[in-house]
Amino acid sequence: MIKLLIALTAVTTLVTLVAVGTVKPKIFPALGAVAAPPTVTISVEELHRKVDMHTLPVTEIVSLY
């Protein structure tokens, strides 16, 4: 009885592995050669132009004395 159970388990496992190997999932698109995105560089001067000190929020501290 135990040998039959082991044999059935082995056959079921092998059939499952073969079935999984033959099925092609359609969820994922086929991966092809994808061009790399262009590298983005920014200079310090450009950062200074984008960050204007007058547009930054100001926190006002009120004296509690």
Image: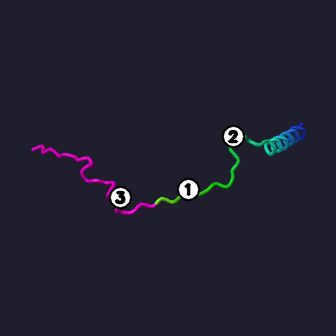
Q: Horizontal and vertical percent for residue 65?
A: 9, 44
Secondary structure beneath dot 2 equals loop
Query: Within the image, what quadrant is residue 16 found in?
Result: top right
The percent position of residue 55, horizontal first and vertical second, equals 27, 48
Question: Of the residues shown, which amino acid type is indicated by label 2?
Answer: Ile
Q: Residues within 10 Å of mark 2 (few under 14, many from 20)?
A: few
Q: Residue at label 1?
A: 37
Please tell me whether residue 42 is drawn above or below residue 18 in the rendered image. below
Give the residues drawn in magenta, as a range.
Answer: 41-65
Label 3 sits on what residue type? Leu
Name the residue: 45% across, 61% down.
Answer: 41
- Of helix, strand and loop, which mostly describes the magenta segment? loop
Q: For the residues carrying marks 2 and 3, which lies nearer the camera in this image?
A: 3
Residue at x 15% of width, y 44% of height:
62
Q: How is the image coloured?
A: rainbow
Residue type at the position of mark 1: Pro
What quarter of the picture does the N terminus occupy?
top right
Name the image quarter holding residue 45.
bottom left
In the picture of the structure, the residue carrying the numbered disc 2 is 27
Closer to the eye: label 2 or 1: 1
Task: Report, in whole angstroms, how far the alpha carbon at label 3 lies from the one at label 1.
Answer: 22 Å
CA gap, disc 2 and disc 3: 42 Å
Magenta-colored stretch includes residue 55: yes
Whole-percent x, y for residue 18 in the image = 83, 44
N-terminal label among 2 and 1:
2
Does residue 18 show up magenta in the picture?
Answer: no
Would residue 25 be found to the left or right of residue 63 on screen? right
Distance between mark 2 and mark 1 Cα atoms: 24 Å
